[in-house]
Image (cartoon, grey):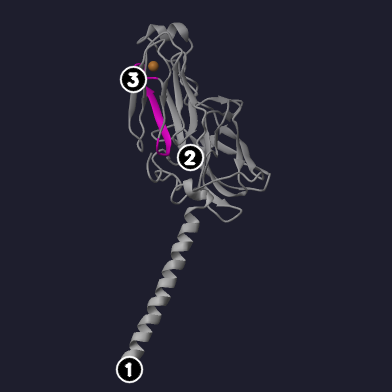
Amino acid sequence: MFMKQTKVWLTLTIVLSLLALASACGTKTENSGPGENAGPTAKEFAPKGNEGTISGAIAFTGTPPAPKKIATDADPACGQKNPNLVTEDTIVKDGKLANTLVYVKEGTLADGTKIADWSFKTPTEAATLNQDGCHYKPHVSGVMVNQKISITNSDPTQHNIHFTPKNNPDWNQSQPNGAAALTHSFARSEILVPVKCNQHPWMKAYIAVMKHPLFAVSGEDGSFTIKGVPPGTYTVVAWHEGGATGTEKTMQVTVAANGTAKADFSFGEAATASGNPSLQMMPALDVPMLGGH
Ligand SMILES: [Cu+2]
């Protein structure tokens, strides 16, 4: 009886030890794989060569608000350099709307993974934000998390660039005329970060901080193109400023392998009723970076 019990315990111990050894080996193999530099949950996306495109045009229905002339009395240098400075919140040409951010909010790739499951390489080139004629160029833009933004002052006057994010630290720097470029980046995704100038209250810009490169901003002809989209089905959002937090439109888009998917959006009078504020709404894949840089 006593011997029998010992035998059972011995067998159990051996089995458990073997199991422990097996799982330890398994862990070792996973850790030494090619993905070990990726984050704890996100593997770096590698293009397969069958990526497609999402493109379209942003329409503006109804009569667009006329641009308003900006009084630059506060700084004569602005009026001298740019006597025709006007508001830029709604730029419409031939019924097409510029400065609309279009981005992939979430979705599932053809292989069943979610876009949020992947991490994407941060571009090594800096994005640019120029203060030229006492307004920002570009007015709306997007960068990736941790991508550098090179901020330049092309004006014969001092600017004070002030990023006012909600999900990142506030950043506020004065930049005298002739000063070297400033560099800034955002460690967390955020759609979108308002930019203002403490010297010139009319100066406004918006920067989207994205976790992936699947975004674009509509040009003066209202068109946009998002390249390098893995085949799959996505929720695509178009955001335009206006009101307290902007207006967003949403569309489901399926991109075939090597295909081009159309995504045309419409803003303006007829579209306003269905618009909803978005600036405070974080997309599902816009969770802060794990491990924090
Ligand atoms: Cu300024």
Question: What kind of element bears circle 2?
Answer: strand
Q: Magenta residues?
A: 187-202
- Dividing the picture into quadrants, the one containing residue 75 is top left
Q: Amino acid at mark 1?
A: Met
* C-alpha span from label 1 to label 2: 76 Å
The extreme right residue here reads 258
Discs 1/2, front: 1
Q: In the image shown, does 212 or 100 lie closer to the viewer? A: 212
Q: Residues within 10 Å of mark 1 (few under 14, many from 20)?
A: few
Badge 1 or badge 2: first in the primary sequence? 1
Q: In the image shown, does 279 or 94 lie closer to the viewer? A: 279
- Residue highlighted by disc 3: 198
Q: In the image shown, does 240 or 289 lie closer to the viewer? A: 289
Q: Is residue 57 left or right of residue 282?
A: right
Question: Quadrant of the image for the N terminus?
Answer: bottom left
- Residue highlighted by disc 1: 1
Q: Amino acid at mark 2?
A: Glu
Discs 3/1, front: 1
Give x and y (percent) for residue 174. Answer: 34, 18
* C-alpha span from label 3 to label 1: 87 Å
Q: Amino acid at mark 3?
A: Asn
**Residue 244, which numbered label?**
none
